[in-house]
Image (tube, rainbow, N blue to C red):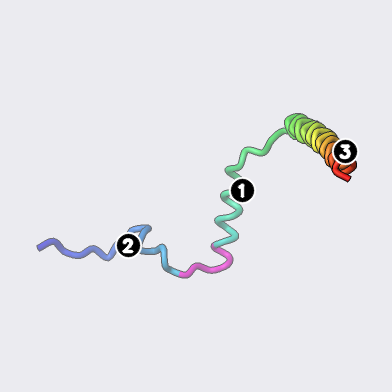
Amino acid sequence: MPEKSNDRSPREDKGKKRSVADYFKDCKSEFKKIIWPTKKLTFRNMGVVLSTVVVSSIFVGLLDYGLGTLFSTIMRISK
């Protein structure tokens, strides 16, 4: 019969409570692994987002104006 080992696997430690300090240490080590975008890439992405917002706003505005005009015309004709 095999002997039971006292070594615990990481799965067994899953339910174990950890301190707040351990949590923040883990957060700090995870933040070091992040590859942050460069300033140039950030501004380029911001330009893409802003242009998409402007184009979408224009589209929705024109759609609103067109449908409003259409419904107004239909309401005038139906009277």
Vertical side of 15 occupied by 76: above or below = above
**Where residue 77 sits in the image (x, y, percent)?**
87, 39
Q: Residue at x 37, y 58 (%)?
A: 10
Spatial separation of the CA atoms under disc 3 and disc 1: 58 Å
Q: Which residue is mark 1?
A: 31
Q: Which residues are magenta?
A: 17-22
Q: In terms of depth relative to the viewer, which is nearer, 59 or 46?
A: 59
Q: Residue at x 57, y 58 (%)?
A: 25
Q: Residues within 10 Å of mark 2 (few under 14, many from 20)?
A: few
Residue 75 seen in the current view: yes
User: Residue 8: which disc?
Assistant: 2
**Where residue 15 sits in the image (x, y, percent)?**
42, 67
- Asked whether the residues under the numbered discs 2 and 3 touch, taking CB atoms below 8 Å apart as contact, a structural biologist would say no
Vertical side of 21 occupied by 37: above or below = above
Residue 54 among those drawn in magenta: no
Vertical side of 12 occupied by 75: above or below = above
Extreme-left residue of the structure: 1
Q: Residues within 10 Å of mark 1 (few under 14, many from 20)?
A: few
**First along the sequence among labels 3 and 1:** 1
User: What's the amino acid at mark 1?
Assistant: Phe
User: Residue 73: which disc?
Assistant: 3
